[in-house]
Image (spheres, rainbow, N blue to C red):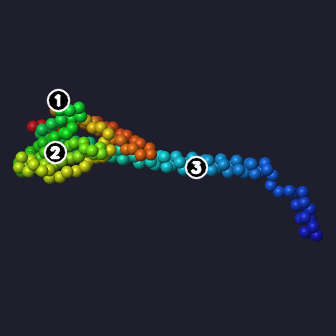
Amino acid sequence: MILHRLGLINKNQRGVTLMGIIIAVAISGIIAGAATTTIFQVFTGNARTSNHMTAVRQVQNAGYWISHDALMALDVVPDTGDTGFPLTLTWTDWDSGDEYQVVYSLIEDNKLQREHYTNRDINPDPNTTTFVAQYIASISCQFTGGELTLTVTATVGGWKPASETRTYEVIPRPG
């Protein structure tokens, strides 16, 4: 008896309609499109943020090292060209009397190089050579009125390129 009633209930149902399938596919497409857009934005944002932070860090490294050495320098000699590089900073240690010289230059592959010399007249080879920054798109300095003005731009390429420019003003120690 119960089986007979169940058979009567399902008798008029014919299955899934075409309209039902179209609505289900449309809703699934909207959900998939939203998920794809969200994932794409997450990856794009991460790449952009990562490249920007790399550019900021490279500009900060260049500014830190040049500022650090310029604060100790008694003699600041930028190149006479358009950019002022290579930049030569010289000072004498008060305790030992040793003369220190640091030369900054922009080399191939957009790297900023720092060569450190101790008593260069006696030993013409650098004590250390360090790359203090990379991705340097442009760098320039001027030494006027006892103040060193340094402008550095780093550009990190790739999928989402980013760029950062900063200007540093440093007054070396008085002679």
The one nearer the camera, 6 or 101, is: 101
Q: Amino acid at mark 3?
A: Thr
Task: Report helix, strand or loop for mark 1.
Answer: loop
Q: Is residue 126 left or right of residue 108?
A: left
Query: How packed is label 2: few (under 14 Cα within 10 Å), some, or many (20 or more)?
Result: many
Disc 3 versus disc 1: nearer the observer = 3
Residue located 22% across and 42% down the image: 105
Between the C-alphas of marks 2 and 3, the distance is 52 Å
Q: Earlier in the sequence, mark 2 or mark 1?
A: 2
Q: Does the residue at mark 3 contact the one at mark 1 (Cβ under 8 Å)?
A: no
Query: How packed is label 3: few (under 14 Cα within 10 Å), some, or many (20 or more)?
Result: few
Query: How packed is label 1: few (under 14 Cα within 10 Å), some, or many (20 or more)?
Result: few
Q: Which residue is mark 2?
A: 102
Between the C-alphas of marks 3 and 1, the distance is 57 Å
Q: Which residue is mark 1?
A: 145
The one nearer the camera, 134 or 152, is: 134
Q: Is residue 16 above or below residue 157?
A: below
Question: In the rendering, at what x and y percent does residue 103 appear?
Answer: 17, 43
Q: Is residue 110 left or right of residue 102?
A: right
Question: In the rendering, at what x and y percent does residue 160 appear?
Answer: 44, 44
Residue 59 can be seen in this image: no
Task: Report helix, strand or loop for mark 3.
Answer: helix
Q: Amino acid at mark 1?
A: Gly
Q: Earlier in the sequence, mark 2 or mark 3?
A: 3
Residue 96 can be seen in this image: yes
Quadrant placement of the N terminus: bottom right
Q: Is residue 147 left or right of residue 135?
A: left
Q: Which residue is mark 3?
A: 36
Quadrant placement of the C terminus: top left
Q: Amino acid at mark 2?
A: Val
